[in-house]
Image (tube, rainbow, N blue to C red):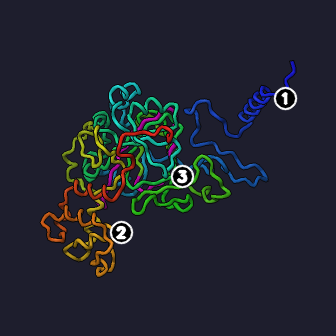
């Protein structure tokens, strides 16, 4: 029987043959299992006479060999040592096999999560990160039903109902760090996720509970070469619109000049990502992580560290600024550190002893102090919300705040201010539009 090369069957056979030839002769193999993917990648030498730059139209990381691994320890550091050697210097570090005693590592199978936490809400995004899309909100059980076949993953606050099964790293258990825990995040996917190149406003300890994650870490001084832009004014975070799956080096020639370090996390490992540090992350197979965002200060107050025991501590035993529990209308992820608001208000005082409502109004409007105080006394175009917020701070109705009053503003009032300044990251109502995911 002869095969007509114009027939559909012949086209199918031809396609299969071309696929086999491509795989057989490609410079970079296509592994059958995501867990076999080599990282850092092997970078072939440029072919003689070729004008094509190394890593052209390849994923980010193929353009240049790494400088080496991120520094590692096999234990968490004492909080003060952690501050001195890494946080104050904004130097990434990996802690190997440091959360193996966290119940989440042993318990959090899909079946367990569905049975125990399926009625909780989570925020869901599409796998190839797009910062211009808003997350969607759905029930955890619905996500677990879909995530192995749909291109979705979770980035959400860890619900309070799950917090007792998540360990707090010992490096955060005293001093400034324990008092400045901002939020805790849950990350979950079926693998195959790729983040954009980005930086965050807050310090972050990212701990892997299941799967594998590859991290590319880059010094912030290379922001220009990677075309980083600020996400929103004064948020302290930003990202690059470069396609991390296919870098066009003829259009983005400087990418190949950027040095980077790497780390691969396995279950039980954690990585510290400093605020402002550039990074790009990929996950493989079923992946599950818990992260803690925290803030620092110019000096580390370790006054309570002498009495700290550093015994096993879970998330319910520490105070976290932004949280979510079942029934909350908003999953308050990504809001600003309220202590930054307090510090901004104190800085507005300069050499004065009072912060007027008018001056605060202009801060509210522009989120920056005006240098000309006479302009700041004008209240045209200042939103009415500014005066309403100020009134919650000015409990004595004097029309001004002293430094002492600013220092004593209740954190819940500052959180209300932050909510006015920023919109929720996800929808308020629990409703999912399936066609958008």
- For marks 3 and 1 on the same chain, the one whose residue lies earlier in the sequence: 1
Q: Are marks 3 and 1 in contact (CB under 8 Å)?
A: no
Q: Quadrant of residue 35?
A: top right
Tell me, yes or no, whether the highlighted magenta stretch contains residue 144.
Answer: no
What residue did someone put label 2 on? 366
Q: Quadrant of residue 112?
A: top left
Q: Is residue 33 left or right of residue 71?
A: right
Identified at 38% across, 53% down, the residue is: 86
Q: Is residue 39 left or right of residue 309?
A: right
Q: Residue furthest bottom?
A: 374
**Residue 59 place in picture, x, y as percent:** 61, 46
Please tell me whether mark 3 or mark 2 is closer to you in this view: 2
- For marks 3 and 2 on the same chain, the one whose residue lies earlier in the sequence: 3
Over which residues does the magenta segment extend? 274-299
The secondary element bearing badge 1 is classed as loop
The secondary element bearing badge 2 is classed as helix
Q: Nearer the viewer, residue 67 or 8?
A: 8
């Amino acid at each position: 029987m002869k095969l007509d090369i114009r027939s559909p069957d012949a086209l199918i056979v031809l396609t299969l043959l071309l696929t086999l030839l491509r795989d057989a002769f490609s410079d970079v193999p296509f592994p059958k299992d995501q867990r076999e993917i080599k990282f850092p990648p092997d970078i072939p030498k440029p072919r003689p006479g070729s004008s094509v730059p190394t890593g052209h139209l390849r994923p980010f990381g193929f353009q240049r060999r790494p400088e080496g691994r991120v520094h590692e320890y096999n234990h968490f550091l004492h909080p003060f040592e952690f501050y001195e050697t890494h946080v104050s210097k904004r130097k990434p570090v990996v802690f190997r096999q440091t959360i193996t005693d966290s119940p989440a590592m042993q318990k959090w199978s899909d079946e367990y999560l569905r049975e125990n936490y399926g009625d909780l809400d989570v925020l869901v995004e599409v796998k190839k990160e797009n910062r211009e899309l808003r997350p969607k909100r759905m029930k955890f059980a619905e996500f677990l039903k879909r995530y192995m076949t749909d291109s979705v993953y979770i980035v959400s606050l860890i619900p309070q109902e799950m917090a007792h099964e998540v360990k707090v790293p010992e490096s955060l258990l005293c001093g400034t760090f324990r008092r400045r825990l901002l939020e805790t995040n849950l990350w979950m996917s079926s693998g195959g996720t790729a983040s954009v190149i980005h930086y965050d406003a807050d310090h972050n300890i990212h701990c892997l509970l299941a799967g594998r994650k590859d991290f590319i870490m880059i010094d912030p001084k290379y922001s220009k070469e990677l075309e980083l832009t600020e996400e929103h004014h004064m948020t302290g975070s930003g990202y690059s619109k470069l396609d991390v799956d296919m870098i066009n080096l003829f259009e983005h020639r400087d990418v190949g000049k950027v040095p980077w370090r790497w780390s691969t996390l396995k279950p039980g490992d954690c990585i510290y990502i400093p605020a402002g540090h550039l990074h790009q992350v990929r996950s493989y197979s079923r992946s599950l992580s818990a992260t803690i965002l925290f803030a620092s200060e110019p000096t580390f107050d370790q006054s309570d560290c002498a009495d700290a025991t550093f015994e096993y501590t879970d998330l319910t035993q520490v105070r976290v600024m932004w949280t979510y529990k079942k029934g909350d209308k908003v999953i308050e992820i990504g809001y600003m550190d309220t202590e930054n608001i307090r510090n901004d208000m104190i800085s507005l005082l300069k050499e004065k002893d009072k912060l007027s409502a008018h001056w605060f109004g202009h801060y509210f409007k522009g989120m920056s102090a005006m240098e000309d105080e006479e302009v700041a006394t004008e209240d045209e175009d200042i939103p009415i919300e500014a005066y309403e917020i100020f009134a919650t701070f000015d409990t004595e109705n004097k029309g001004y705040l002293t430094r002492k009053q600013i220092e004593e503003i209740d954190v819940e009032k500052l959180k209300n201010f932050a909510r006015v300044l920023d919109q929720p990251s996800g929808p308020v109502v629990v409703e999912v539009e399936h066609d958008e995911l």
